[in-house]
Image (spheres, rainbow, N blue to C red):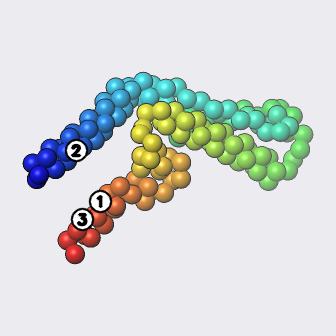
Amino acid sequence: MAQTADRDANRALRARFDEVFGQYERLRSGLDDLQQRLARLRVTAESEDRHVKATVGPRGQLIKLELDPRIYRDHNVEALAAKITSTVQQATERATSDVQELVRGYLPPGSGAADYLRDGNFGSLLRRSDAALREEAERDE
């Protein structure tokens, strides 16, 4: 009876290993493509009045800022600064969303890395490790 239980457990473990290894192979084979796509990612946002246009890269870094000459008619520098900041933030939010969408296709569902990209919470990266440690601690009690 114990041998049958061991064989069943081994089959289940082997099936789970095959599943995880398959996910890893898919992830690994697509990383070069993902890196190239991320490197090419550019997102542009424009202010409502079209006086400010900001282009950012995949990490939200400002790559290009275009100012329409009409902005010089209004001498309110605080308003201009707010408009530039808002436009860059819009572009960055869209870039973050685009990166999340690209990466989602390469990471397994429920992956800590995918969750971290979505929520920016470092705890997401360690969620699985934390759960494994808790289980181990509970078994030791």
The residue tagged 3 is: 136
Q: Disc 1 vs disc 2: which is toward the camera?
A: 2
Q: What element carries label 2?
A: helix
Q: In which quarter of the image is residue 55?
A: top right
Q: Residue at x 42, y 46 (%)?
A: 111
- Residue 14 in picture, x, y percent from top left: 21, 39
In space, the residues marked 1 and 3 are separated at their CA atoms by 6 Å
Q: Give the camera-side residue of 32 and 56.
A: 32
Q: Is residue 10 left or right of residue 39?
A: left
Looking at the image, residue 141 sits to the left or right of residue 101; the answer is left
Residues at badges 1 and 3 in contact (C-beta under 8 Å)? yes
Between circles 2 and 3, the one closer to the viewer is 2
Q: Mark 1 points at which residue?
A: 132
Q: Residue at x 50, y 46 (%)?
A: 117
Distance from the alpha carbon under mark 1 to that under mark 2: 16 Å
Other residues around mark 3 within 10 Å, as few (<14) / some (14–19) / many (≥20):
few
Up/down of 35 relative to 75, above or below = above
Instruction: Say left or right for 74 vs 102.
Output: right
Mark 2 in CB contact with mark 3 (< 8 angstroms): no
Residue lying farthest to the bottom in this orientation:
141
Secondary-structure class at tag 3: helix
Mark 2 is surrounded, within 10 Å at the Cα level, by few (under 14), some (14 to 19) or many (20 or more) other residues, namely few
**Residue beneath label 2, please?**
13
Question: At label 1, which amino acid type do we have?
Answer: Ala
